[in-house]
Amino acid sequence: MKITLATFGSLGDLHPKISLGLELKSRGHDVTVAAMDFYRERIEAEDLTYASMRPHFDMEDRDLAVELMDLKKGPETMMKKVLFPNLRGMYDDLTAAVEGQDLLITGEVVYVADSVVAKTGIPWISTSLAPLSFFSASDPSVYPTVEWMDALRFLPSFFHKTIFSIAKTTIGGWLGPYREFRREIGLSEDHEPVFFGKNSKLLHLALFSKVLAKPQPDWHRPTLQTGFCFYDRASDANTLEPALAKFLDAGEPPIIFTLGSAAVMDARDFFEESAKASRILGRRAVLLYGEYNNPPKGLDGNIVGFPYAPYSLVFPRAAAVVHQGGVGTTAQVLRAGVPHLIMPYGHDQPDNAARCKRLGVAEIVRRNSYNAENAASELKKLLTDAAYRANAAEAKSIIDGEGGVKIAVDAIENILKK
């Protein structure tokens, strides 16, 4: 069968789709991945068919990265500056990508999916990568700009439904371009793509582990929770750079510091302060500072830096991991079974961080409070209290037993058989 997977966002958004694509391909299906041009080489390296899908922007654009990762304005900037001005382009590209295909599978912010399905009739499966996507009043999330609401989780569901109504009204004021786009292609403008009108009625896949969140009565139906769908680059997924491998073999497990693939473009002094924190603790450290950044200051024989390393190989060898809380990075740390210190930026990151803290595997440092002294204080707690590692090991055992990719692709094939 011919299947198109469509995604927009960071590597945390792309990698699960590549993971699904590779499993589908191994079962004999013809797989196309529709994404921005920046990812073409990465997709084609896996022998998957690439389809260009707007919007396109340079992931090395630091000014835009700063805007998109802003805690308070990031989601609004993403919609108003990137997604909504490109709705017609995304629609035209995705319509072309699904021509002659048997199934469409989309990621979270492919807002034109419902419109493409309405116009082409192609069967559609939607996906979510993090619990935040469900806007559950039964299991409230921590939303950007209102992180203080985590302290109000105990309040009854009607309170959280009221908050959603207010948020929906606010975001409804941003949807003028979406309504205009729907009118332009001959569809009703009475459709909301952000909250509760974004998921397929055929099947929705929750591609995250139950250690982060379990199914709730107010989740979209039908939804199947599969577990995480992991992927590392095919070219280096099974190898470490020799210098890094030698460092890891030479002493006690280090603390690993990383900011994923998007937040790392706005690292500020994170890596320099992290190096100082490691010295305060007298611990070895690995700084994964990003492929588009210069090596940070403060490196020496015990504190080393590399632009990139496969998370699946380095995280299990860490004493702890310090990261930004993106769901892709969070999933890899949870699978590694080690404690986390999380410095969230925006989007789903504050919620992922809060869930890991409640799970007893992590602590949180706010971005504007991250410095060597604060990081060292929290890391000392994580490294000396055995409960964090015990809880992390328990979470790892659950994730190891979930088989997210297999479960997801089995469900996809069941839809194809209908």
Image (tube, helix red, strand yellow):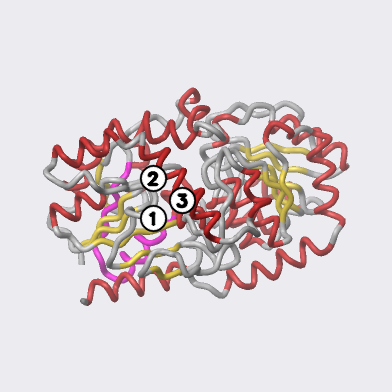
Magenta residue check for 75? no
Query: Of circles 1 and 3, which is in front?
Result: 1
Q: 26 or 52: which is nearer to us?
A: 52
Instruction: Count residues near mark 1 (Cα–Cα under 10 Å), then give few for <14, some for 14-19, many for 20+.
Output: many
Residue at (26, 41) in percent of width and height: 52
Q: CA distance from mark 2 to mark 3?
A: 10 Å
Query: Of circles 2 and 3, which is in front?
Result: 2
Q: 278 or 163: which is nearer to us?
A: 163
Residue at (24, 52) in percent of width and height: 114
Q: Earlier in the sequence, mark 2 or mark 3?
A: 2
Amino acid type at image mark 1: Ile
- Determine whether, in the image, residue 404 is placed left or right of residue 366: left
Q: Which residue is mark 2?
A: 42
Instruction: Count residues near mark 2 (Cα–Cα under 10 Å), then give few for <14, some for 14-19, many for 20+.
Output: some
Magenta residue check for 17? yes
At which x and y percent is residue 187? 15, 46
Secondary structure under badge 3?
loop
At which x and y percent is residue 16? 43, 56
Q: Earlier in the sequence, mark 1 or mark 3?
A: 1
Residue at (34, 60) in percent of width and height: 21
Q: Which residue is mark 3?
A: 235
Q: Which residue is mark 1?
A: 18
Q: Is mark 1 in CB contact (under 8 Å) with mark 2?
A: yes
At which x and y percent is residue 360? 73, 61
Amino acid type at image mark 2: Arg
Query: Is 311 located above or below residue 336 in the figure?
Result: above
Dividing the image into 4 quarters, which one contains the C terminus?
bottom left
Q: Which residues are magenta?
A: 16-35
